Every structure is written in C-alpha cells, then in structure tokens.
C-alpha cells in the first residue's frame, strides 16, 4: 500500500515546495527593503497557490486515513454508554469525515489543474467539470481527462453520500448497515431462544459477534483500498503536471537562487530545476 509520504517525496511536490520557498525569500527581501508588505509578483503568487493546494491534498488524505483509524479503533461497550452514543453513530460520523475528505481531494485536483494550466475559468470555488474538461481537451490533455474520469468513477458513491449528508443530513453505508440492523433486532429474540430467527442480529450471540466483526473488517478494507487508490491517482496526476510546472520556471529566477539550490542539493531539484537552467 502506498503512503502519503510517497506524495511528499514525489518530484512535483518537492519541486513545487522549493519554488515556493525561493519565491517567499524574494518576497521577504522586498518587504525588508520597503519596510512594508509588498504585493506578490505573479510567479510568487503562483508558487504559493500551488503549494497551498498541495498541503490541502495532504490534509484531505490524512483525514481519510484518520477516519479509518477511528473506525478501526476498539472501544468497550462502557465507553459508548459513558459518552451517550452507540458504536454505529461513531462509525457513521467517521465515515462521513472520510467522504468529506475524498470529495475535498477531488475538488483540490480540479483547482490544482486550473492553477498549473493558468485556465481562466471564472470562479475557482466551484469548478464545473464540463468546462474544465473542454479546456483540457482543447489543449489535448487527454491523459488528465482520463485520469479524472477514472478517479471520479472510483469515488463517486462516497462523494455523492457526502453531498447528500451535507444538504439533507442523511448518510447511509451498506458496509455499516449491519451495525444499525443489530440495534433494531437486539430485542427480537432471546439469545437462548432456539426459535430465534435472527441470531445474527441479536446482541451478544455468537452469530452477532461474527457479523459485527466481519462487517467492520469489510468496511475498513474497502476504505483502505480507496485511500490507496487516491494516493495512486494523486501521484499519477503529479507526474502529468510536472512538465508544465518546470516549463513555467524562469531561468533567471533559477540563476538568482543558484547558491541556495546547490545548498539544498535535492535529487529532484537537481534533476528538474538545475537541469533546466543548464540547458537554457
């Protein structure tokens, strides 16, 4: 399984962070000279926005992972009674956080693509897929379009549930419904009643414990698979956007910070930024 740290070590992420750092150094120098806050130059603002979006992507993936850890965490029955809620409510809440994280990630993909390409798309708060898709196709960015469509197919069910929950306050998950059904059927029959038709839904029975355990495991496995897929899509998108980021870098900007870049001595920085300067 891929890890979020792989994203932080990717060429796109490391190069974008270094470019933002250099832009910020220039900004601070101008502020020191004028003794007031200057306006950011266009490339400084661009690198700052890109890095901010990258931090948002890391945050969204981290919340998704944290949500699964909370669902995975074991609590005894007294814990839930003490805090006044049932286990299903806890799992459903953390599943909603997971859905929110994956929907946020999708939105950040759109915003990052718009920023890197410099698309004039109007409001960047609500980017319409049809508009973005047409702009990408006009630039023959078929690979990015394909990636975004595959990503949406993967996460569609969970993103839609986040939207429904946000607007209507209603959230369901087939992977969690057996928890809810358990509470409905708790008093359906005595656990020692041989005629009980629903032992799997009767709290405390062997069948019920097995159902709870297997349902929870199935839920956790699926959510972890979604996290892994999301990390893979993120890495692939970064690889597709990297050449555009490098092409935008001004050689004079690189040369003005050559000593710093040499001092950083980062493999990806040397391979992409320093090489660009040497070839120009």
Image: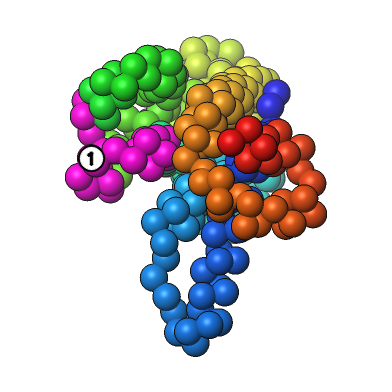
Mark 1 — residue? 121
Task: Please indicate, yes or no, whether residue 208 appears anywhere in the rendered image.
Answer: no
Query: Is-magenta flag for residue 97?
Result: no
Say which residue appears at 37% left-offset and 36% top-offset: 117
Residue 6 placement, left or right of 95: right
- Where does residue 216 sit, x and y in percent of width and height? 60, 27
For the question of whether residue 199 can be seen, the reply is: yes
Provide the residue span drawn in magenta. Answer: 109-131
Q: Is residue 118 magenta?
A: yes
Question: Which quarter of the figure is the N terminus placed in?
Answer: top right
Question: How many discs appear?
Answer: 1
State which quadrant residue 154 falls in: top left
Which residue is located at x 73 percent, y 39 percent?
A: 270
Label 1 environment density (alpha carbons within 10 Å; few <14, some 14–19, many ≥20): some
Query: Looking at the figure, which quarter contains the C terminus?
Result: top right
Residue 55 lies, in percent from the top left, at 54, 49
Q: Residue at x 68, y 41 (%)?
A: 274
Residue 131 percent across, percent down from the top left: 21, 29
In the rendered view, does 160 fall on the left or right side of 68?
left
Vertical side of 219 occupied by 197: above or below? above
Quarter-of-image position of residue 266: top right
Left or right: 212 as drawn, with respect to 3: left
């Amino acid at each position: 399984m891929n890890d979020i740290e792989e994203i932080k070590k990717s060429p796109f992420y490391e190069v974008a962070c270094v470019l933002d750092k250099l832009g910020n150094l220039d900004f601070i120098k101008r502020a020191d000279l004028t003794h007031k806050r200057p306006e950011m130059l266009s490339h400084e603002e661009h690198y700052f926005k890109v890095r901010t979006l990258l931090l948002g992507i890391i945050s969204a993936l981290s919340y998704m992972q944290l949500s699964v850890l909370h669902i995975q965490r074991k609590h005894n029955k007294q814990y839930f009674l003490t805090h006044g809620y049932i286990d299903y409510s806890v799992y459903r809440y953390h599943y909603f956080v997971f859905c929110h994280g994956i929907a946020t990630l999708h939105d950040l993909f759109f915003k990052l693509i718009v920023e890197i390409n410099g698309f004039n798309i109007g409001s960047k708060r609500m980017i319409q897929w049809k508009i973005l898709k047409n702009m990408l196709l006009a630039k023959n960015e078929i690979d990015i379009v394909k990636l975004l469509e595959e990503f949406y197919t993967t996460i569609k069910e969970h993103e839609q549930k986040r939207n429904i929950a946000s607007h209507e306050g209603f959230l369901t998950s087939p992977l969690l419904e057996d928890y809810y059904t358990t509470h409905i059927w708790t008093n359906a029959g005595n656990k020692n009643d041989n005629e009980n038709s629903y032992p799997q839904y009767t709290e405390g029975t062997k069948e019920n414990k097995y159902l709870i355990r297997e349902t929870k495991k199935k839920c956790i496995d699926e959510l972890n698979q979604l996290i892994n897929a999301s990390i893979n899509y993120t890495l692939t998108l970064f690889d597709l956007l990297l050449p555009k980021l490098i092409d935008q870098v001004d050689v004079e900007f690189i040369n003005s910070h050559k000593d710093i870049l040499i001092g950083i001595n980062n493999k990806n920085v040397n391979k992409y930024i320093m090489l660009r300067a040497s070839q120009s």
